[in-house]
Image (cartoon, rainbow, N blue to C red):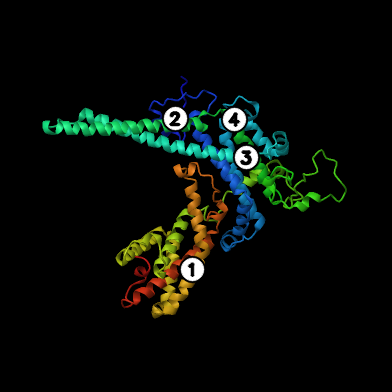
């Protein structure tokens, strides 16, 4: 029996799941074995990148790039935003390629074993050679469907092994209870023994059935698949995805390897067919490429570049992912500001009387307690600078007209202002929260294949000064709304510090 080497990664907790004897042939050195879960997680990442490059998602991305939040807080420059999106997707693909390279070291076939050298060569300009050599554009959708099925099976296997681990823990607890339980009175001994035996038999039958399910899933999943087959599928998918990235962004992003448009592949059917008939002004080019290919034009490439720009263009693209010093991400406040905005949105829903999912089962007392808790939580999340700016603006409002805060028209006006600001701040805050959740690598995210949130749509690249100014406007408006609603019930006697914050 060949001993399995447990990798030091998030799969280490599976050791307990394999403690029970499972009647299945142990995987050989050429099979994935326990590394099937790492391979499935890598496949899920590749499928996610592939789905994010689908035409509907790209159209949605272009629409988001023209939104008020991104245009105002980040930049209205579309080429710059496209470079950010391309750098984010390419860095995600690089992380998946690193995982494929680690698994390729155990392959015996030449191609998957050399992927650690093939992928950098493809990024440096030999991508089209590999595309034509391995026919990567043919069958790419079929490979994605196969990997999707393998990921789903691996996710079920992981869940069933988790259930098996719980059943085995229950069996061990029952055995320990039998050994160390105290003496049972004679009149209850027979009934208690029968009940314990029944529970024990039921647990053993359930445990036996669960082991059979795990054995069946092991045989159907990547557990028994060879390294060569699994890694070859992932390597070809990674290269075809790189080709797709170049097709989508090469006209706007400098530094990507040159590619040719394939008009007859359904995967790239978004390209206008009119380009297939385009000809050079100097006549047909003498090229060994088929007529169905056409070189991508790089409209954004500068005519004159320094030598270091030519030598390392992709490193410049990766550096785009570092937020500038004047951004929220550089200050490390992206998630915190997102939570502030979401809490303000929740408080606005309470004050406006809109239904809120967390408050649907509570009464008026519960609503009031939850509102005060939200206000206190919101105040505690505010940084010192934002808190001081809010207090200064509140004092200014009080100096102008103290009794204006009890005017319904003023409260309604602030409500409209807040709703307008949160209509574009709220989605960006939710995307920021979702971006952090997707990168926590918990059980729900390891095998997720849906398109991931791009950093472009979060607060990481948002201008810090503009974001804080918008937040101050929202908080001051909420304070005025709170003043109005409270003054309908009691005289105007609360201080500035007691009006919005507890």
Query: Comparing marks 3 and 4, which lies closer to the viewer?
Result: 3
Residue 225 coordinates in the image, percent (x, y): 54, 29
Determine the CA span between mark 3 and mark 1: 46 Å
Mark 4, other Cα within 10 Å: few <14 / some 14–19 / many ≥20: some
Residue 49 visible in rendering: yes
Mark 3 or mark 4: whose residue is earlier in sequence: 3
Q: Residue at x 44, y 79 (%)?
A: 409
Mark 2 or mark 3: whose residue is earlier in sequence: 3
Query: Comparing marks 2 and 4, which lies closer to the viewer?
Result: 2
- The answer to whether the residues at label 1 and label 2 have Cβ atoms under 8 Å apart is no
Determine the CA span between mark 2 and mark 4: 21 Å
Question: Dot 1 lies on which element?
Answer: helix
Q: Which residue is mark 4?
A: 229
Question: Dot 4 lies on which element?
Answer: helix
Q: Nearer the viewer, residue 266 or 461?
A: 266
Q: Residue at x 77, y 44 (%)?
A: 293
Q: Which residue is mark 1?
A: 419
In the displayed structure, would residue 217 be above or below residue 306?
above
Question: Which of the numbered marks, if any, corresponds to residue 142?
Answer: 3
In the displayed structure, would residue 410 be above or below residue 240?
below
Q: Which residue is mark 2?
A: 215
């Amino acid at each position: 029996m060949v001993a399995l080497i447990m990798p030091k990664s998030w799969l280490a907790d599976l050791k307990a799941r394999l403690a029970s004897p499972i009647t299945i042939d142990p995987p050989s050195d050429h099979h994935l074995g326990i590394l099937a879960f790492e391979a499935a997680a890598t496949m899920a990442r590749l499928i996610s990148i592939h789905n994010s490059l689908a035409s509907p998602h790209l159209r949605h991305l272009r629409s988001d790039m023209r939104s008020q939040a991104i245009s105002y807080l980040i930049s209205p420059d579309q080429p710059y935003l496209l470079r950010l999106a391309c750098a984010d997707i390419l860095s995600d693909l690089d992380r998946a390629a690193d995982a494929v390279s680690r698994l390729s070291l155990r392959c015996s076939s030449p191609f998957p074993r050399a992927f650690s050298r093939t992928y950098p060569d493809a990024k440096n300009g030999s991508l089209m050679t590999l595309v034509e050599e391995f026919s990567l554009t043919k069958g790419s959708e079929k490979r994605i469907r196969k990997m999707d099925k393998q990921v789903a099976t691996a996710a079920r296997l992981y869940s069933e092994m988790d259930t098996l681990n719980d059943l085995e823990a229950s069996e061990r607890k029952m055995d320990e209870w039998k050994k160390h339980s105290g003496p049972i009175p004679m009149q209850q001994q027979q009934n208690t023994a029968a009940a314990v035996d029944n529970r024990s038999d039921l647990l053993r039958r359930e445990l036996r059935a669960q082991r059979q399910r795990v054995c069946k899933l092991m045989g159907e999943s990547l557990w028994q698949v060879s390294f060569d087959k699994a890694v070859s599928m992932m390597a070809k998918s990674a290269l075809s995805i790189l080709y797709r990235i170049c097709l989508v962004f090469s006209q706007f992003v400098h530094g990507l390897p040159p590619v040719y448009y394939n008009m007859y592949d359904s995967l790239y059917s978004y390209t206008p067919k009119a380009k297939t008939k385009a000809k050079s002004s100097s006549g047909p080019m003498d090229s060994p490429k088929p007529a169905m290919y056409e070189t991508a034009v790089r409209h954004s490439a500068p005519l004159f570049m320094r030598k270091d720009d030519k030598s390392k263009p992709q490193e410049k693209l990766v550096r785009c992912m570092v937020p500038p010093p004047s951004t929220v991400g550089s200050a490390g406040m992206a998630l915190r500001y997102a939570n502030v905005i979401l809490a303000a949105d929740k408080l606005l829903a309470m004050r406006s009387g809109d239904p809120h999912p967390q408050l649907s089962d509570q009464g008026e007392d519960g609503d009031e307690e939850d509102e005060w808790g939200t206000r206190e939580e919101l105040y505690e999340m505010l940084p010192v600078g934002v808190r001081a700016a809010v207090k200064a603006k509140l004092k200014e409002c009080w100096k102008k007209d103290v009794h204006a805060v009890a005017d319904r028209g003023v409260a309604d006006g602030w409500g409209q202002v807040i709703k307008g600001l949160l209509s574009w701040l709220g989605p960006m805050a939710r995307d920021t929260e979702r971006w952090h959740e997707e990168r926590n690598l918990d059980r729900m995210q390891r095998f997720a294949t849906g398109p991931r949130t791009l950093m472009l749509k979060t607060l990481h690249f948002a201008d810090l000064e503009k974001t804080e100014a918008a937040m101050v406007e929202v908080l001051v408006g909420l304070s005025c709304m709170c003043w109005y609603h409270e003054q309908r019930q009691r005289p105007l006697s609360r201080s500035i510090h007691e009006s919005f914050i507890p």
